[in-house]
Amino acid sequence: MANIIIMAKESLQFTDLDEDSLVHIFSFLNLEDLDRLARVCHRFYIVITVHLYSRLSARLLQTGHQPKAAHCPSRNVIEFDFRRRISLFENWRYGRYAENQFFQHRMLYFSQIMLEKRWLYMSHRGQLRVHKRTAERGLLRVKPSWTVGAERQSDINWMVKKGEVIFAGRADGSGFMYDCRKRRYSKQVLADDIVTAVDFEGELFVSTGKSSSTCFWTGLVEDGQYALERRLEVADAYQTIKLSPDGGSRLAAGKYHDRAKSALRLIDVERGFSTVLNSPSRAVYHLLWKDSCTILTGNFDTTMRLVDTRTAQDEAIWSDPYDASVYYPWILLVVLNCAFLINRHRFPDIFQPETIQLRNCLSANVINPIEEMWFKGYNLHESPRH
């Protein structure tokens, strides 16, 4: 009998322990040891991923824990597992990023920001301020080199710059066009509602209101001043709009809220016909054209979606690792106490755009005046690894 008992004890292996025992033993290991142990066998990998990585991820500041793929029924869902979320947190904590504080203000207000190689364009209430970028430690001159408009004017809600021309919309329904080279300012009346977004390609200009309509305009120059002549009006209002890069033959538009999950639309500019794209989303906060056939959207449901207009459906979906609504694709911006820090997410080369925009959402615990940024192949704040 004794021999039988001894043989039974010798046949018991470490891998034979129950799951609770393994979780308790593994909980004493650090992250590097867990990574090594997860490669031993499939059972250890499952136990560590489900019970240990998720627990460690839950303790971090910037990670979320929505049920995986619960909100992404499409076929190509690209998600971040719990281990990847831990890596993202470590990237923020130990990565090659420096933080600089600019534009301290006593009251909260929204700003639009456009970043170029030499200049930073930033709205301050109703005024557009242009700051010069430098190679010095701060990387930016706080005092503006020149300004457009006045603070007391209505807030600038959206602005677009292409070449030397800036087109902007204000909260009172007005807008303006500004020629940076000639320093020429032209006021425009766009709507009797809050202007939520504007865009232009060549002589074609577009504006949309919060609850009124979307208008297409033809840009004219009269007596040295810019003027807009209305050519088409669409009854629907949108949160974000962007003309296609093929000369503006189509307009990609996203609604702020759509119960039927049909927030993404494609509008024929010549005829004004609207087509619903099969990209299920209740709200599209922002969108970009990757090329003349592909749109990238940032959505309320915490996803970024790559949509092919030829098939009218999603080709790929990225789920935000922090379970936060995606305001602007391509770059994640964190703003703490009026400071901003840029983190580069490296997507495949085919998804690298020339111009990148983003908007961060406001938090109840964060005082944040920065709402939008344009990024053209350069990092505003980057330093050697600390």
Image (cartoon, rainbow, N blue to C red):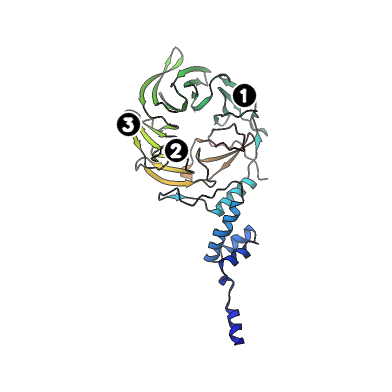
Tell me if mark 3 has few (under 14), some (14-19) or many (20+) residues whose alpha carbon lies within 10 angstroms of its own.
few
Q: In the image, what residue occupies the spot 63% across and 61% down?
A: 27
Q: Is residue 250 visible?
A: yes
Occupied quadrant, residue 6: bottom right
- Mark 1 belongs to which amino acid? Pro
Q: Which mark is residue 273?
A: 3
Foreground: disc 1 or disc 2 = 2
Pick the residue in front: 310 or 238.
238
| Relative to 378, 383 lies left or right | right
- Mark 2 belongs to which amino acid? Ala
Give the image location of residue 22, x and y in percent.
Answer: 59, 66
- Mark 3 belongs to which amino acid? Phe
In the depicted structure, whether residue 306 falls above or below residue 271? below
Q: Earlier in the sequence, mark 1 or mark 3?
A: 1
Pick the residue in front: 215 or 98.
215
Tell me if mark 2 has few (under 14), some (14-19) or many (20+) residues whose alpha carbon lies within 10 angstroms of its own.
many
Q: How many marks?
A: 3
Give the image location of residue 274, x and y in percent.
Answer: 34, 33
Foreground: disc 3 or disc 2 = 2
Q: In the image, what residue occupies the spot 54% across and 44% down?
A: 345
Mark 1 = which residue?
Answer: 144
Mark 2 = which residue?
Answer: 283
